[in-house]
Amino acid sequence: MICLMNGCYTFTGGNSLPEHLQTIYIPPVTDNTGLGTSQYRDAMGQFLVAKFRNDNSLRVVESGGDSRLTVTMASATEAAVSIRPGERERERRLTMALDVEFYDAVQRRQMWRRTFTENQNYDVTGDPQRERDRAVRVILDRISDQVVISVISNW
């Protein structure tokens, strides 16, 4: 009985990408945040390419492709975390939202469109720009993980 059941059960790892999708094209990331630096959009593109290459679910191509992932850094807002009367600001929270579309270029249809939002606190008492850059990278790294998972699980 066990031998019979063993032949009936397979595990595919949960990958629910359509079989016709083998490659992915990731155009340059658009930055509409007003943060004023191209390094953030470049970092997001690099995170995505590296994570898709490590995942091996879709092969990243320079143009064309069976699928396309379009990413727009839509917004970035900052706010003080907490300030008591008479205190100087010590920490800020950066919140970023990225609009992402996953498109099936073979069947010419949108697979999904989502907004991914993450936040990260950073210290403003030392070098606030360096800390803000670090916070942006943490956020983009987290969102790139979420995007790759969303693409390969197709949700």
Image (cartoon, rainbow, N blue to C red):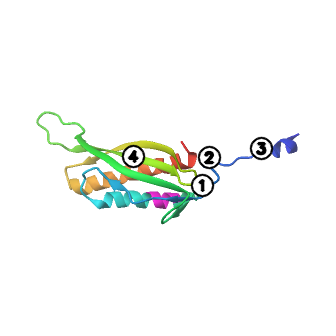
Q: Earlier in the sequence, mark 4 or mark 3?
A: 3
Residue mark closest to the camera, 4 vs 3: 4
Q: Is residue 1 left or right of residue 46?
A: right
Residue that numbered label 3 is attached to: 9
The residues tagged by marks 4 and 1 sit, at their Cα atoms, a distance apart of 22 Å
- Residue type, label 4: Asp
Q: Residue at x 81, y 43 (%)?
A: 8
Give the mark toward the camera: 1 or 3: 1
Give the left or right position of residue 117, taking residue 153 as reference.
Answer: left
Please tell me whether mark 1 sits on a helix, a strand or a loop. Answer: loop
Q: Earlier in the sequence, mark 1 or mark 3?
A: 3
Characterize the local packing of mark 2: few (<14), some (14-19) or many (20 or more) Cα atoms within 10 angstroms: few
Which region shows up in magenta? Answer: 48-52
Location of mark 2 (residue): 16
The kind of residue on which mark 1 rests is: Leu
Residue 99: assigned label: 4
Look at discs 2 and 1 and give the one toward the viewer: 1
In space, the residues marked 2 and 3 are separated at their CA atoms by: 17 Å
Q: Is residue 122 left or right of residue 84?
A: right
Give the Cα separation between the discs numbered 4 and 2.
22 Å
Structural distance between the alpha carbons of marks 4 and 3:
38 Å
Image coords of residue 32 (percent x, y): 29, 51
- Image quarter in which the N terminus is found: top right
- Outermost left residue: 86
- Magenta run includes residue 12: no
Q: Position of residue 126 (x, y in %)?
A: 20, 54
Residue at image mark 1: 21
> Residue 27, position in %: x, y?
42, 59
Of labels 2 and 3, the one closer to you: 2
Q: Say which label, 2 or 1, has the lower sequence index.
A: 2
